[in-house]
Amino acid sequence: MSRYPITFQKPENALKRAEELINVSQKSAALQALHDVLTSKRHRTWQKTLEKIMFKYVELCVDMKKGRFAKEGLIQYRIICQQVNVSSLEEVIKHFLKLASDRAETAQQEADNVSLDVEDLEAEKSPEELMLSYVSGEKDKDRADRSTVTPWFKFLWETYRTVLEILRNNSKLEALYAMTAHRAFQFCLQYKRTTEFRRMCEILRNHLANLNKYRDQRDRPDLTQPESLQLYLETRFDQLKVATELELWQEAFRSVEDIHGLMTLVKKSPKPQMMAIYYAKLTKIFWMSENNLYHAYAWYKLYNLSKTYKKDFTSGDLKLMASCVVLSTLSVPPYDRKHGAAHFELELEKDRNLRMANLLGFSLDPKRDTREVLSRAALLSELNSKNMVALAYPEVKELYNLLENEFHPLDLCQKVQPLLEKLNTMSDGFSSSNTPMPDVSLSQYTPALERLTILRLLQQVSQVYQSVKMPHITKLIPFLSMDEVEKLIVDAVKYNCLQVRIDHQNQCVHFGSQVLESDKIKNHITVLTKRLNRAVQLIHAELGAKQDLASKADSKQTLEQIALEHKTVLARKVIIERRKEEQERLLLEQEREEEETKRKQQRLNEEAEKKRQTEEARKREEDRIRREIEEKENEDLRAMVEQVNKRKGKKGKVEDVSKIDRRQLMEDAISEQIKERQEMERKLLRLGKTMDHLERARREEEVPLIEQLYQTQLVEDEKYFKEQQQMMLEQSKAQYELDFAQKARFVKMQGDKNIFQEQVMSRRTEEFERLNQERLERIEERKAFRKVEREQARKKEYLRRLREEEEARLAAEEEARLEAEREARRLEREEEERVANEAMERQLGLSSPAVRTAMGPTASVIAVVVNVMVVMIAVVVVIAGEVVVTAGPAKSSPVEVMNQRAVVTAGEAADAVMMDLLAVVIAGAVAASVTMDLLVVVVTAGVDLLVVVVTAVMMVLAVTTDLPEVVTAGVVVTVMPLAAMPLVVMIEGNLEVPGGKSCIKAAELLKG
């Protein structure tokens, strides 16, 4: 894609450019071009072309699976058409969802076709396919789904999330939001995507939480509106349906809590049809969570709701639902499982029961124990008060009487068993088509009813017998085995429902426990009273007849009085209930009026505040726009004035534009622009004609060449196609024959391979055990060997350290001894040299003035001879390379000469070094020409001839000149010139040279 965005003056150009790029298979560039148009600030006003661009844009995003680009484009398009044409955004999103869904369904069909596209249905799998299936653990369909279907499913899931994220805060597209959520739920249900369903539920919860948190946002959905609330409730009910069908009961319970939260948020009950679905799903949820009590209450609420609001409720449906209510109530265990629990557990159970009661629509006092209000006994009393048992099936009614009213300690199970078998064979469907419960299974209550029957049997037997043999109990209970009955007895005893002790040693079951004497005689006193009254009647029969007549009269009067009092109580109860209902109605009406008044006042305040803020924002916006327009006009005017001045040859900027005649200036500028435009149009016209001629000529020349190339390409393509087809057929046939032969060979060797594999594996297992044992032994040996090595290494290191310390000590002592000897020799040598120098000075004695005066003429002659010799030596040196000349006695030792040596090194510049060298050489030569006893000159080849000539001339000049002073030289000079070719002059003796200053002055002149 392009690094820099492409700008288009018109969106139509971008759309045309994108279609051209698509035609040449450059979809990425086309998508980028459309994306640049949508994100450009130049096209912020909605127009029909942008809708076409969005359709093309989402098509490219779906083709290339570019979910991120689709999200960015939809967000930008929402900004563009939010306040102008929201329906356009709706159409684009619907088109986007349709494309993504169609591609996912197409991929699923292709994957199914791949799994069915088998050439030979009787052919076995190839060895490669078998090995791949064993290694990966996947089937062919799983691999096809992963490669073909899964990417499109991921893209479709990302599409749903993107659309919901874009529409979550848009009140004008609530219906589209609900439709998208419904399609996402259907996607999860159709393809069993449980993980994505949980994520979708969490996304919707977060959207609702943010909606309640930021209520003052613009265009936010208002849940107080009936339409908005209805859409959100329908979405949550769809979520609840899908959760139950996917058997995600925890998510279904959370969905129920979401629905209840919405209902409490707006304090308005949904439609009866929705509430029926709500309670129907609650019955399933509570049944799956084994909460039979709330399951029964959910059935009870569903029964009341259906009976009240359903007009087409038939007698058969009423009997079936009443039977479900009665059976679910009987299925509730007759004891409290939290009996004897700790305080903390009771508090948790209390909070849980409050939540359940709120979900069922019961308003309970948090301070009271919910077990007193919502219990099995309370629900049974409600059923009896409404005569619901009589409305149920006859089998259910008989079952209820056997388990709750009648006393059959020895044949209760035998009487209940055929009724339970009839329940299992009953049809469990409602005749009504729009019922929230399409199918109801009465047989699901059979296990709970069997357990209840066993408990009732044991309770009744405990009232008759103190102990019963276990085999007898087994005969009385045909439902369960003795082990299961024993588990049921243990639970009943644990929760104080029965008082039973099981004696396994004697195979007996003992009923009852140690009780107080008052409990023992409580029933006996009643029996004694009845029997004494019967004896009195037998003794005094006539008195008994009279008393019977009197008692009958009294009984009749009493019954009449009871009936009258009963009617009075009922009437009073009705009056009290009416007064309560009237008072509650008045309170509700008053609260409703107060709430409505507050709501109206709040709405008025909000509207006034919003209006004020809108008015202030409008004024600020108008002021800003006015200032910007004025500044823009002034800037344009200033630019026009400067442009006019520039054309006229004036310079400088225009500061004050208020005094300029804008009208005249505008007319001048317009006329100038018209002239420039006309001139530009004439140039473009001429250029266009030229380009047209050139293009026409080029195309005329290209026509025969293109035709020839096309014909040639056709022939070559046809030839290449035939060759490829023939090659492919030959390769396929050869490969097929080879595969078929390989298969036949492998099938024959299958048994041998298995036998060989078993032999190899057994042999390798034995070998592995043996090698493993050897490896362990080697490891132990290496450990012992390494331990010995570490001990020896430590000892060697200790000895080496001791030896090094001893050697260092001896070396230090030897170094100290050698240093002392060197110091002694140096002192001795210095003393010898000092004595030798003193003796030489006493021998020569040449420094006196008398000797210097006496030797004047002789020195001149000697100087001439020596200088001629020096020139000759220099010439020979240049030609031959190296010459050694000695003259005079050699009385001085080499040690004395070396101790008087001075070193001069050329380091800064060649000229300076060379002049210093000439000065030293001239001074030495003059001194040697006068009183030199020994002159040794060593010259190495490589010295310039000019240096030698100049040296000789200066020597002659120094000798022939009358010099009044003497220069004493007693040094050895070594010179290293810059060319790295050394010139060494060694001069020994105590010399007195007249005219030393002249020699040095000549050297300085040459140096300058």
Image (tube, rainbow, N blue to C red):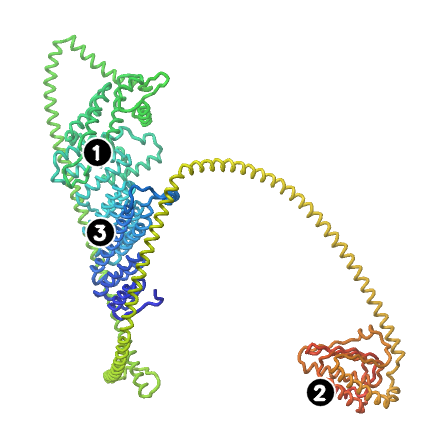
Residues 733 and 803: in front is 733
Q: Earlier in the sequence, mark 1 or mark 2?
A: 1
Q: Residue 625, can we see it? A: yes
Quadrant of the rendered image containing residue 992: bottom right
Q: Residues within 10 Å of mark 3 (few under 14, many from 20)?
A: some
x and y, in percent, of residue 74 in the image: 27, 59
Q: Give the left or right position of residue 541, taking residue 191 as reference.
A: left
Q: Is residue 73 above or below residue 179?
A: below
Q: CA distance from mark 1 to mark 2?
A: 134 Å
Q: CA distance from mark 3 to mark 1?
A: 33 Å
Q: Residues within 10 Å of mark 2 (few under 14, many from 20)?
A: some
Badge 1 is on which residue?
441
- The residue at 22%/65% (across/down) is 49
Q: CA distance from mark 2 to mark 3?
A: 111 Å
Residue 1006, disc:
2
Residue type, numbered disc 1? Ser
Badge 3 is on which residue?
179
x and y, in percent, of residue 289 in the image: 29, 36
Residue type, numbered disc 2? Leu
